[in-house]
Amino acid sequence: MERIPILKMGDYLLVSIQVDMHDRLALSLQDDLTDRIVKSQAKGVLIDISSLEVVDSFIGRMLGNIAAMSRILDANTIVVGMRPAVAITLVELGLSLKGVSTALNVEKGMSLLEQQTAKRKVIGNGRNGL
Amino acid sequence: MASVAPITHRFSTVLAANEQNLLAEWMKVQPPAKTFRSDRIKESELREQSREFLRALIDALRSGRALDLSSPEWAGVRDILTELSRNRAIQGFSPGETAIFVLSLKQPVFEILRQEFGSDPAALMDDVWSATALLDELALFTVEVHRKGRDEVILRQQQELLELSTPVVKLWDGVLALPLIGTLDSARTQVVMENLLEQIVNTGAALAIIDITGVPTVDTLVAQHLLKTVAAARLMGADCIISGIRPQIAQTIVHLGVELGSVITKASLADAFALALQRTGMSVSKAPAHG
Amino acid sequence: MVATGCETVPLRSGEDVVIARQVVRRWALETGFSLVDQTKVVTAASELARNTVTHGAGGKLTIEGLQNGHRKGLRLIFEDQGPGIPDVNRALQDGYTTGTGLGLGLGGSKRLASEFEVRTQVGQGTQVIFTRWKG
């Protein structure tokens, strides 16, 4: 079965969803990502959904799950590139994507990830933190 | 659809046999027709359209099938008339001018029929009746298509007008402003908001100020659209500030029970802009005076 | 009101849900829906098709193009012979704000529709009729 490729960029993992996924593919992406986060000790995950014309409750839940699981594994998740029509539909559907951080594009998403990672370093480091 | 007189075999045979002649006579009749505008259509183009239509008409008649524009036998005629009417509508011809194209074919057809059946009044009557009913029906079809074509033009013009009257302005790097002016209705608000979200993506601006200083009243639907837009912007990774809420509108919002929730509002566009700059990590400072 | 054509899509697997999305998008485009409305219709179709496969044990989708005077629309009929829905009202309210619900996707899809009807009988099956008018 085909799998969605996961790229490693420094401390981060980058996923670009370019196909209309069937549910099984979405679930295997969830599994693959969790696996890779652990294996690579990634500090963040960037999911690019700019090619998705439709985000329904299943995909919404998938994104929420990925965000929650990565948080447990001490990584941040940012979803980027949501199309206006998709955003409007999600609002109408009533799907809030709680727990999922978003940014307009890959550039802003990476910058946000780096900010968040830097913040964590400060907090984590007893001498500079509280 | 009005019932059409049956088309006799002799009628379609006569037309087929006289195709070239018909075309020639038809071309003579078309240009001097009272409302025809020769400035907008070339003679050669018109001749080609006429030739195509006549050919398709004769083919359809030959099939023996009574006039039914939804049938495959008449598809050729339907497609040619549809394209022609659409184009004429876009070029600015009136529905009448477009219908004249079909109706002007009557004279040459009657002439041919008279030549062939002048000595048989009954046959002549039948076929003249068939011809006129047929061409009337086709002319009406062109008017209908023309109307639809015009509606599309009007719709597109309305859209363009809408976009012109509510421009999204780039105030600063990463900050857009949408000054809304005039009464908002549900449809207009939706279009305008969708446009704003598109601009957010296109310019990569993470902050949009929606200024409603110029909006006299806001009803529940419009308020909900505004809130939905803010929610959508946030889902995308941007945010909105609503500015210019006048006391009356503030009262209406409270009265309607609309929950602004975590939406940030500012009294003036200037305040909103200052906040936007702050959030993007900028500040405005005075330049040192020059002596 | 007139039906201006129809198409049937079997819904037996996850892949069929993807196909259903694509077919519905094609119909939405032909009906002349705006991009946002297309997205709404296809998203609702995705939810409801998934329900049919997952909760209805498989069934089919029938798409109908509608014309009411000058108004064009699209009707999506999802049918299955599955277990049926015991409490439709509850299902319509379920779980979107929490994001966890039973995931029936009914309530959300209803919000995306112009007209929405659920016919169901426990032990016999379910029919969901989703209609969206243009403009």
Image (spheres, rainbow, N blue to C red):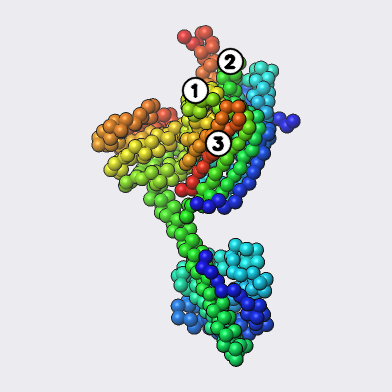
> Label 3 amino acid?
Val
Which chain is indicated by disc 1?
A: C
Q: Is residue B39 visible?
A: no
Q: Quadrant of residue B4?
A: bottom right
Distance of label 2 from label 1 (alpha carbons): 20 Å
| 3 and 2 marks in contact (CB < 8 Å) | no
For image coordinates 65% across by 80% down, the residue present is: B10
Q: Callout 3: helix, strand or loop?
A: strand
| 1 and 3 marks in contact (CB < 8 Å) | no
C21 or B190: nearer the viewer: C21
B24 or A128: nearer the viewer: B24
Q: Quadrant of residue A59?
A: top right
Residue beneath disc 3? C128
Residue beneath disc 1? C98
For image coordinates 28% across by 32% down, the residue present is: B255
Distance of label 1 from label 3 (alpha carbons): 24 Å
Q: Earlier in the sequence, mark 1 or mark 3?
A: 1
Rendering coords of residue A12 (x, y %): 62, 24
Q: Is residue C15 left or right of residue B33?
A: right
Which chain is indicated by disc 3?
A: C
Rendering coords of residue C123 (x, y %): 60, 27
For image coordinates 74% across by 30% down, the residue present is: A1
